[in-house]
Image: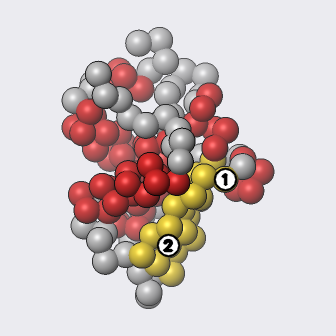
Amino acid sequence: MKEPITTFGAQDELNACLAYWQEKLFLQHWLVIAVMVDAGEIDGNSGRTVAQWGGSTALIRLNREYHEHGKPHTKCPVELTLVHELLHLRLGKESENEALVEQMAKSFLMVKYQIPLTWFRKDM
Ligand SMILES: [Zn+2]
């Protein structure tokens, strides 16, 4: 069964996934660059995005180590963080409801991979 991407082996793979989600989220007109970085570069966060809202450009940095291990009880595939960060771009700079953005990111992955919400639990 195909599952959400846990880690990107190569930049090509990340670029392909980024293009897939930019189209699905109506963000094709954005110039988005996504890269995997060491945890220290983004203070241990799962991901961090810097956007130029006027120019519709963004740099998304994804924590390489974070997604390989996840949280104690939750799977955190890197694709989930990528979708989460893209949703922030789609919803605008006022999108401060982190829980809602995270739920929406999970919704998109559940639909893409035909997986239930319980998939994100580590004991499943
Ligand atoms: Zn967020």
Q: Amino acid at mark 2?
A: Ala
Residue 42 in the figure: left or right of residue 34: right
Which of the pair 93/113 is nearer the observer? 113
**Which residue ends up furthest to the top in the rendered image?**
123
Question: The C terminus is located in which quarter?
Answer: top left
Q: Is residue 80 shown above or below 50?
A: above
Q: Is residue 71 shown above or below 11?
A: above
Q: Which image quarter: residue 23?
A: bottom left
Q: Secondary structure at mark 2?
A: strand
Residue 82 locus on image (x, y percent): 45, 51
Q: Secondary structure at mark 1?
A: strand
Residue 17 locus on image (x, y percent): 38, 51
> Can you identify the residue that label 1 sits on?
37
Residue 108 in the figure: left or right of residue 60: left
| Marks 1,2: beta carbons within 8 A | no
> Can you identify the residue that label 2 sits on?
58
Q: Which-is-in-front pick, marks 1 and 2?
A: 1
Residue 61 in the figure: left or right of residue 79: right
**Which residue ends up furthest to the bottom in the rendered image?**
54
Residue at 52% of width from left, 61% of height from top? 34
| Label 2 environment density (alpha carbons within 10 Å; few <14, some 14–19, many ≥20) | some
N-terminal label among 1 and 2: 1
Q: Is residue 47 visible?
A: no
Residue at 62% of width from left, 28% of height from top? 69
Q: Is residue 23 visible?
A: yes
Residue at 43% of width from left, 57% of height from top? 15
| Label 1 environment density (alpha carbons within 10 Å; few <14, some 14–19, many ≥20) | some
Residue 65 locus on image (x, y percent): 67, 38
The image shows a total of numbered marks equal to 2
Q: Amino acid at mark 1?
A: Val
Residue 67 locus on image (x, y percent): 58, 36
Q: Is residue 54 shown above or below 17?
A: below
